[in-house]
């Protein structure tokens, strides 16, 4: 299913950028203003070069973004001429020295891609599947969350795009992004930990193949019987020629149904993995680091002391609570206390 897989919405939007430059700044085009605005976005504190930066990415201000990216798409990439056999081209009258038509965009576009939890309210469980209207509600909820957490940055970028003049609220921005929405058919991530036990939509190739080939093979047999003068199928007593026609039609119908089944099977979204939501991912990163410290600190302890130390560890870090003692979004480490969220009132 487009846009949805493993409990996540893989969002892609394309907003056309205005031509020319604004009246109050005729020296800088709208496209360049978009690039300048994007360049001002602080990056997440997720690398040695940025870990000590004073500002974090604005996309780290909510608990839904697994990935977010904005960039300017000037035009389509020319991949070269569509090749053709010279003899076939000559017979068709296709002159290969004449340039072929090249696809072009009608304007540069601001592209926004995001991988977000497919939820309407923070804390909701990730869904197995969603209808079109439910996906639209998720996208709208996410757009409102963006607006409420980074309105200034969004205005700085999107004010150079067509249609943004009418955007003055979170709901307006949700409607605007929905107009810019482009279906996404390839997910951006994979959090599955146990591939063998995951409920993937495996295609039953052999049953489908046997189901299609059986009537076709029977049809070939009855055709051969008819060609050799056997008017009726032995034992069954069916007329050979009509049986061949019916078997051929049945095989074609089953082949069509098998193809449709394979396509629909591939379109079904995968169910979310056990710990796919962003709060679980952040909690896992926090526990991973703290447990590594625990392991180093408590090597060689007697069993009773180790058991007591582990009990104290679980009491302090509360591994089952995704919202208390967890790593904040957009940071690389939980070593700094400022990178840790402490919220005793949050549910487990």
Image (cartoon, rainbow, N blue to C red):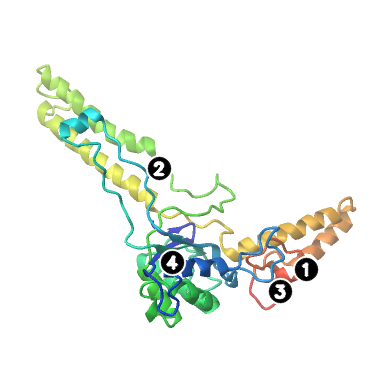
Give the CA separation, mark 4 to mark 1: 51 Å
Q: Mark 4 points at which residue?
A: 31
Quarter holding the C terminus is bottom right
Badge 4 element: helix
Q: Which of 313 and 141 is in front in this view?
A: 141
Q: Earlier in the sequence, mark 3 or mark 4?
A: 4
Q: Name the residue under label 1.
A: 316
Q: Which mark is residue 71?
A: none
Left or right, 105 with respect to 157, comes to: left
Characterize the local packing of mark 3: few (<14), some (14-19) or many (20 or more) Cα atoms within 10 angstroms.
some
Give the CA separation, mark 2 to mark 4: 46 Å
Q: Mark 2 points at which residue?
A: 203
Left or right, 93 with respect to 138, comes to: left
At x 39%, y 50%, the residue is 77
At x 65%, y 71%, the residue is 55
Q: Which of 145 and 282 is in front in this view?
A: 145
Q: Which of 71 and 235 is in front in this view?
A: 71
Characterize the local packing of mark 1: few (<14), some (14-19) or many (20 or more) Cα atoms within 10 angstroms.
few
The mark lying in front, picked from 2 and 4, is 4
Give the CA separation, mark 1 to mark 2: 46 Å
Q: Which of marks 1 and 2 is nearer the N terminus?
A: 2
Give the CA separation, mark 3 to mark 4: 42 Å
Q: Name the residue under label 3.
A: 342
Left or right, 306 with respect to 231, comes to: right
Give the CA separation, mark 1 to mark 3: 11 Å
The mark lying in front, picked from 2 and 3, is 3
Characterize the local packing of mark 4: few (<14), some (14-19) or many (20 or more) Cα atoms within 10 angstroms.
many
Q: Position of residue 118 (x, y in %)?
A: 48, 65
Badge 3 element: loop
């Amino acid at each position: 299913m487009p846009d949805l897989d493993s409990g996540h919405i893989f969002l892609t939007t394309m907003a056309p950028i205005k031509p020319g430059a604004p009246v109050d700044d005729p020296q800088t085009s709208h496209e360049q203003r978009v690039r300048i605005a994007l360049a001002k976005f602080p990056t997440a504190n997720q690398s040695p070069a940025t870990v000590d930066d004073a500002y974090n990415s604005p996309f780290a201000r909510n608990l839904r973004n697994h990935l977010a990216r904005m960039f300017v798409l000037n035009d389509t990439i020319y991949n070269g001429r569509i090749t053709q056999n010279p003899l076939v081209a000559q017979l068709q009258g296709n002159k290969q020295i004449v340039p072929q038509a090249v696809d072009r965009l009608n304007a540069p576009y601001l592209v926004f891609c995001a991988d977000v939890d497919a939820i309407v309210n923070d804390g909701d469980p990730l869904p197995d599947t969603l209808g079109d209207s439910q996906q639209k509600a998720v996208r709208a909820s996410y757009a409102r969350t963006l607006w409420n957490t980074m309105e200034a940055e969004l205005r700085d970028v999107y004010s150079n795009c067509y249609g943004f003049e009418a955007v003055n609220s979170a709901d307006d921005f949700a409607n605007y992004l929905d107009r810019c929405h482009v279906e996404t058919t390839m997910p951006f991530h994979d959090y599955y930990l146990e591939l063998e036990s995951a409920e993937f939509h495996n295609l039953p190739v052999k049953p489908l193949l046997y189901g299609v080939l059986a009537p076709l093979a029977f049809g070939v047999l009855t055709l051969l019987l008819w060609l050799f003068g056997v008017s009726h199928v032995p034992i069954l007593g069916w007329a050979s020629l009509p049986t061949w026609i019916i078997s051929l039609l049945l095989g074609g119908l089953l082949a069509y149904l098998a193809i449709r089944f394979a396509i629909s099977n591939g379109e079904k979204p995968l169910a979310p993995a056990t710990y796919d939501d962003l709060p679980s991912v952040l909690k896992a990163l926090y526990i991973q680091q703290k447990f590594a410290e625990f392991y180093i600190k408590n090597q060689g302890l007697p069993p009773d002391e180790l058991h007591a130390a582990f009990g104290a560890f679980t009491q302090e870090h509360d591994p089952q609570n995704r919202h208390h003692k967890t790593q904040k979004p957009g940071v690389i480490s939980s070593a700094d206390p400022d990178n840790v969220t402490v919220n005793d009132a949050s549910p487990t």
